Image: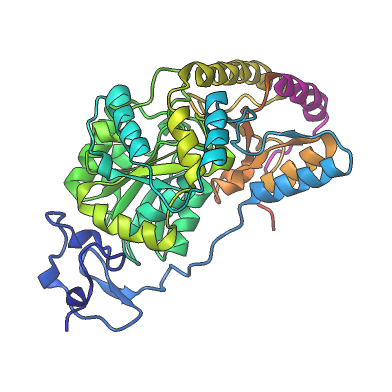
Amino acid sequence: MAREALTPQGACADPRPSARAGAGGLPRAGRVALAPGLVQNRAGTIGSSRAGMSGEIEPFHAIGISRLAHRLKAEGRSVIHMEFGQPSTGAPRAAVEAAHRVLDTEAMGYWESPALRERIARHYLEAYGVRIDPDRVILTCGASPGLVLALTSGFAPGDRVAMARPGYVAYRNVARALHLEPVEIACGPAERFQLTAAALRALDPAPAAAIVASPANPTGTIIAPGELAAIAGVCRERNIRIVSDEIYHGLSYVGPARSMLEFDPGAVVINSFSKYFSMVGWRLGWIVAPPDLLARARACVGNLFLTAPSLSQHAGLVAMDCADELQGHVETYRRNRALLLEALPALGLGSIAPPDGAFYVYADVGHLTGDSLAFCERLLRDTGVATAPGVDFDPVDGRRFIRFSFAVSTAEVLEALARLKPWFAAQPRVTAPTAPA
């Protein structure tokens, strides 16, 4: 019996893009029964699901830096945490008060808030002019499970996923863990460290998916509306599903970021309460799933994650209407950004990615090191300032970059700069940095 006949509609198994109605690629009738361990990709080629997809993932080195930072702090050292994109502010005051009321009055349980899904849908109409059905909003335990959900429900082992390099470390590692094949596209200053329509058009064969992030981690760069439209057009022509990571929306210093849903209604959008809403520890996010993936996405989320925390959903609903307090945080980040942009060139860090949004500065330190991980560890031990090594975001060229997060307080940014100035001045220059052995 054919495999499709054994799989209920909307089940988490068999999520090949070519199985979507009208998605192009091979129709169901064109597929063959495959032996275990084999996959048939979108071009019809059959191969081993293990080829180039070992499932092995690399460490997130910034976590190791953070562990060292916390150990040094426990030993009595003064540490400034600029290694994570973690707001130093807490959840909005009204959201915390709502959580206290719920704790006093409700037992809670497995639950997905209809009111929160409706409020998120209204957000898309108000912020982007996009009308979506609240049923398309799936609440998650943050953006990281949202990424797992998007890739699990939309694609099958062997599918290729295009992404920018540099890019968030979890993109390639989650893809590998799910036995997808990450296709990293080198994006440098000429491309503003971002994917372009031209790069996606040049890929041969076309990937099954493209991950777009605007504003991006680690650079903060924002893709212009015209380029977003061009990317959507190329992906539509080549049957590439867009996964748009919009976790840094609301954190922009050059005008509002645009949602990919404005240009491609079939995109899968990921967002979270961790960044703009300053609710990292509450572990709450969402995806907007297109109608053709909705049943499968709900089957996957129910089996893999159950539901987002009930308490967080109550608090998140209130947080969405705390604009004045949240915009105050953005103004703090804007000041911190300005301080770094003014001070870093004097430290010899004049080559940086344009930090249009988010709360990062991605700086070239290639004149000082060819090993950004060792450099960040030495910087932390010597100064107490924790930063993220570029190799997390770019395994090829990231050895010459580090990332600063300015999501801390302004006082901490000023103190960090005071420590960094003499330290950078004392560092020897290298003429031909090499990769670590």
- Residue 419 among those drawn in magenta: yes
Residue 181 in the image, given as x and y percentages of width and height: 39, 61
Q: Give the quadrant of residue 104.
A: top right
Q: Write the residue at 47% across / 32% down.
A: 189
Q: Position of residue 94 (x, y in %)?
A: 53, 25
Q: Is residue 244 above or below residue 343?
A: below
The N terminus, quarter of image = bottom left
Q: Is residue 31 visible?
A: yes
Asked whether, in this view, residue 76 is left or right of residue 84, the answer is: right
Q: Could you tell me how many numbered marks the image carries?
A: 0
> Where does residue 330 sit, x and y in percent of width and height?
53, 20
**Residue at horizontal 44 percent and vertical 40 percent from the top:** 187
Q: Which stretch appears magenta? A: 411-432
Question: Percent from the top left, x then y, of residue 221?
Answer: 46, 29
Looking at the figure, which quarter contains the C terminus? bottom right
- Horizontal side, residue 250 vs residue 95: left or right: left
